[in-house]
Amino acid sequence: MKLTVRRHQEGKSYDESFDVASLKVTTLLAALYEIKAKVDETLTFDAGCRSGVCGACAVRVNGRETLACSYTPQDGDRVEPLNYHPVQRDLRVDKAKAQETLKKVLPRPIQNPKSKIQNPPLSPKEEALFRLQTDCILCDSCYSACPVLAVNPDFLGPFALTRAWRYATDPRYTTDEPQSDSKPKSSILNSPFSILDAVQTNGIWDCTLCGECTAVCPQHIDPKSDIMQLRGESLKAGYNDPNLSTQSFGAPDFGGGFGFDPNAGF
């Protein structure tokens, strides 16, 4: 069995094939370790728990994001680093810039003046609202799979928007009390740090809803659904989709852009 690895060393990028037929291979990560130990000690990659929990070993195999520790290699597989991340060496990338997006959606806990308990415990029903989103391991697979980042490098990306929805459904970070009469009000998303404000620009409206993020998530989280939920709450809160103002539905019409010609007959 042969594996092709996209190498990045000393300013050069190239493909190199390795024959792993004689090596002990159970997962792609095991194959990479075997190559490093017995064939080429300069091969560089990231790994951590080896159990699909830490997300450190995320790579692209045949153009699809996956965790190396969970993937069973096939003959002819091509392995390369994640998209949209600076490559440090071979399969190892710098995730710092991508994960900076999380800072834009981090809220502050709300202290309830009526309660003597600081951050009271959640009920099972409340916790269930964001249980799945909390399972994100920040492997960056969804970020790498997102086509929007190819044209807009400032896009927040799927995992940041999933994190935004996670906090938006946590009562410890949200309140029903409006913060300002001059800002839109939402039934669940008003907080000292406005989660909705944070995701309007380069956020929920830039997403194409293609679902690639959902397809590659190893934790079975659905960022596409989370983004749609944030869109719905934004509309209820008084925010508008900025894309609608630039769309045209054809002409002639009544001036509303819907392509209806009153003189065309029926």
Image (cartoon, rainbow, N blue to C red):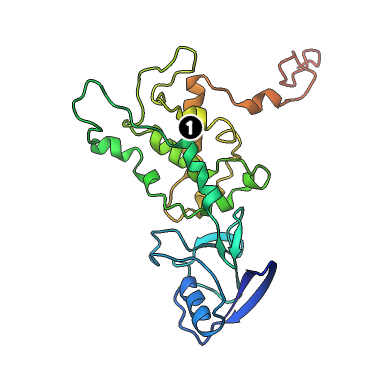
- Residue 72 to residue 178: above or below: below
| Residue at image mark 1 | 230
Q: Residues within 10 Å of mark 1 (few under 14, many from 20)?
A: many
Residue 11: x and y in percent read: 69, 66
Nearest the eye: 142 or 182? 182
Q: Can the viewer see residue 80 in this picture?
A: no
Which image quarter: residue 249? top right
Residue at image x 55%, y 46%?
Answer: 211
Q: Residue 259 vs residue 141: left or right?
A: right
Residue at image x 44%, y 41%?
Answer: 163
Residue at image x 49%, y 80%?
Answer: 34
Give the farthest residue toward the left: 116
- What SS does tag 1 mark? helix
Nearest the eye: 71 or 193? 193
Nearest the eye: 202 or 60? 202
Q: Can the viewer see residue 264 in this picture?
A: yes
* Quadrant of the image containing the C terminus: top right
- Residue 83 to residue 42: above or below: above
At label 1, the amino acid type is Leu
Residue at image x 67%, y 69%?
Answer: 10
Residue 150: x and y in percent read: 66, 48
Residue 117: x and y in percent read: 19, 30
* Quadrant of the image containing the N terminus: bottom right
Q: Residue 255 vs residue 126: left or right?
A: right
- Residue 195 to residue 218: above or below: above
Residue 153: x and y in percent read: 64, 44
